[in-house]
Amino acid sequence: MNINILEALDNLSRQTSVIMVGSKKLVVKEYGREVGLIKWFMVNLSSLSIKMYPFVLNPRNRMEREVAFLKTSTPGFSKPSLYIVDYIGKRIIRGYVEGEKLTYTMPVEVYRLLGELLGRLHCSNWAIGDTKISNFIHSGGEIYIIDAEQAIETRNVEHFIWDLIVLVSTLAISCYTNCILNQNTYLDRLQGFIKGYMGSTCIPMETLSSVMLSDDVKILLYLLIPFPLNTATVKTLNNMFFREKHTG
């Protein structure tokens, strides 16, 4: 039986609640909740051998990262409005985004757009850190990011690659049961996402391909994605980036 730590942590670590103020729907996020601390402590432990991203555990630090990202004008993803920042209580109140959380059943075009937007964000020297697909909402032709508590300003290519790894892994995990026998459902969306990213990223393609073809990335993909989708993922990415490296 395959047990996915990312999916389990996502269910365990909810830090948000929805409130109504008059007719307006808002989201309260409390960074000091124990479930949020447990989530990032376990993620840190699980990635000790391959440190690709500088996660923070401290509630105030996580809040400061998210607030900085929400307040900064960046290309790519739409963001919810930020209304209140409570540094003492370590919580924020932000707008509620109506729409659908990303799922593996959404059209390939949505995943191509997702890749394009992530590439544009990386071009502005921001990485998200927690790019699981449930952190994105498709609404009115736009894609919103609704969780950015690990977002940082960075020029480190490994941080951008980490964003790709987490997104690809959680996409595979989300459709695992249904995609074992129909891998094309997953692989079509994977390829759409990567093609969208390749078309918009500012990372030199030779650099991007070299990192994506590295042993460290392959190890993480094999660890995070259950068999047999991990094998299919690595093979597909190898084909895409090897071809790009030798023709681009």
Image (tube, rainbow, N blue to C red):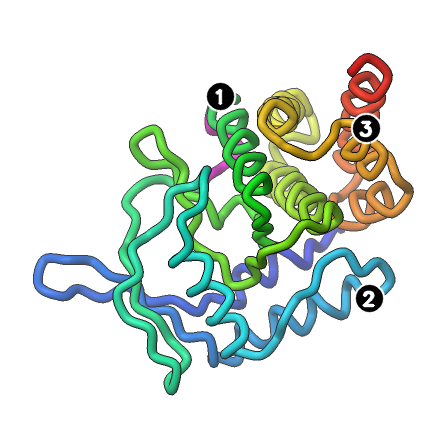
Residue 152: assigned label: none
Residue to which mark 1 is pinned: 109
Does 69 appear in magenta? Answer: no
Which residue appears at 64% of the width and 54% of the height?
A: 154
Residue to which mark 2 is pinned: 48
Which residue appears at 33% of the width and 73% of the height?
A: 85
Range of magenta residues: 102-106
Which residue appears at 85% of the width and 34% of the height?
A: 210
Apparent side of residue 28 relative to residue 161 in the rendered image (left or right):
left
Q: Nearer the viewer, residue 199 or 24?
A: 199
Residue to which mark 3 is pinned: 206
Q: Secondary structure at mark 3?
A: helix
Residue lying farthest to the top in this orientation = 247
Q: Main secondary structure of the magenta part?
A: loop
**Residue 115: where, in percent of width, then height?**
56, 31
Which residue appears at 52% of the width and 80% of the height?
A: 34
